[in-house]
Image (cartoon, grey):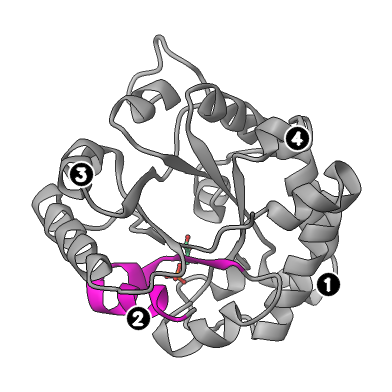
């Protein structure tokens, strides 16, 4: 059964005490929702995972890291491995965010390794894909998204693929205030689901959660989530205020 998910991606924001406070607010707000129609996840910096996990204990909110290393362990100073993330009690890792691909040169091949390591550690993966403004203007965006998904995910067997959530995040809509229209997003989500159906069959495709990310906020979430292939959101800026995040969680 396909799940609706609203996941926050805090990015490089909040100190640990601020993050703990925000997590408490999100947990309490979600606990008040009588008829919760989605899973709720907070994606937090590595430094926050353990403290936020303690806060979330006993509640409904799940925990994600925002990345993991492309090696399992060893002499990689400053890196944080998938088993380390899993040992905090985190449920998910966000992988392939355009900020990681763009600023830290993460390649399709490297992300394939990260996906394998995250799944081997027992984490689920929120895998991001999406095109730049130039790629959209050139009409190449279907090709870009296809390459990202096929190159880093389609080596998985169907059982492993069941642990993948896909997030379509057009780079031109991230943090810009410019949202893809619900129709633009739906076009890509349907395309992604078709790719999955061609590879794994209709049932797997139907069961896969595909999130939209990019300037999603309480005022536009309901219209996006009403589309048949949009199963929730990966939320940046609006996940940093519990009230805004809750406004998106309750948009279904
Ligand atoms: P914004 O919601 O701030 O546009 O960020 C989206 C995003 O990058 C989530 O991963």
- Residue at horizontal 31 percent and vertical 53 percent from the top: 12
- What numbered label is drawn on residue 247? 2
Mark 3 nearby-residue class (10 Å; few <14, some 14–19, many ≥20): few
The residue pinned by badge 1 equals 138
**On residue 158, which mark appears?**
4
Indicate the quadrant containing the N terminus: top left, top right, bottom left or bottom right.
bottom right
- For marks 3 and 4, the one nearer the N-term is 3
Q: Label 3, label 4: how many angstroms apart (C-alpha)?
A: 31 Å
Q: Is residue 233 positioned above or below 198 on the image?
A: below
Residue situated in front as seen by the camera: 203 or 177: 203
Looking at the image, do the residues carrying marks 2 and 4 touch, with CB atoms under 8 Å apart? no
- Residue 79 visible? The answer is no
Residue 197 in the figure: left or right of residue 28: right
Out of 2 and 236, give the one closest to the viewer. 2
Instruction: For marks 1 and 3, give the CA distance.
Output: 47 Å
Which badge, 4 or 1, is on the more N-terminal residue?
A: 1
| Above or below 132: residue 96 | above
CB of mark 3 within 8 Å of CB of mark 4?
A: no
Q: CA distance from mark 2 to mark 4?
A: 34 Å
For label 2, the SS is: helix
Single out the mark in the foreground, 2 or 1. 2
């Amino acid at each position: 059964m396909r799940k609706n998910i609203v996941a926050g991606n805090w990015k490089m924001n909040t100190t640990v005490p601020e993050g703990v406070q925000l997590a408490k607010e999100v947990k309490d707000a979600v606990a008040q929702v009588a008829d919760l129609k989605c899973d709720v996840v907070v994606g937090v910096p590595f430094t926050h995972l353990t403290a936020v996990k303690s806060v979330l204990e006993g509640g409904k909110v799940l925990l994600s890291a925002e990345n993991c290393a492309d090696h399992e362990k060893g002499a990689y100073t400053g890196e944080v491995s998938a088993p380390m993330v899993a040992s905090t009690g985190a449920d998910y890792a966000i992988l392939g965010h355009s900020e990681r691909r763009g600023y830290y040169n993460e390649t399709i091949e490297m992300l394939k390794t990260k996906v394998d390591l995250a799944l081997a550690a027992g984490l689920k993966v929120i895998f991001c894909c999406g095109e730049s403004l130039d790629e959209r203007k050139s009409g190449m965006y279907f090709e870009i998204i296809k390459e990202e998904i096929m190159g880093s995910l389609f080596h998985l067997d169907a059982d492993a693929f069941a642990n993948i959530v896909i997030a379509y995040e057009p780079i031109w809509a991230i943090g810009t205030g410019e949202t893809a229209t619900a129709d633009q997003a739906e076009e890509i989500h349907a395309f992604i689901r078709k790719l999955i159906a061609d590879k794994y069959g209709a049932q797997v495709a139907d069961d896969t959660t595909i999130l939209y990310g990019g300037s999603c906020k309480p005022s536009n979430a309901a219209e996006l989530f009403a589309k048949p292939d949009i199963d929730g959101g990966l939320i940046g800026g609006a996940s940093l205020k519990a009230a805004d995040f809750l406004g998106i969680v309750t948009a279904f």
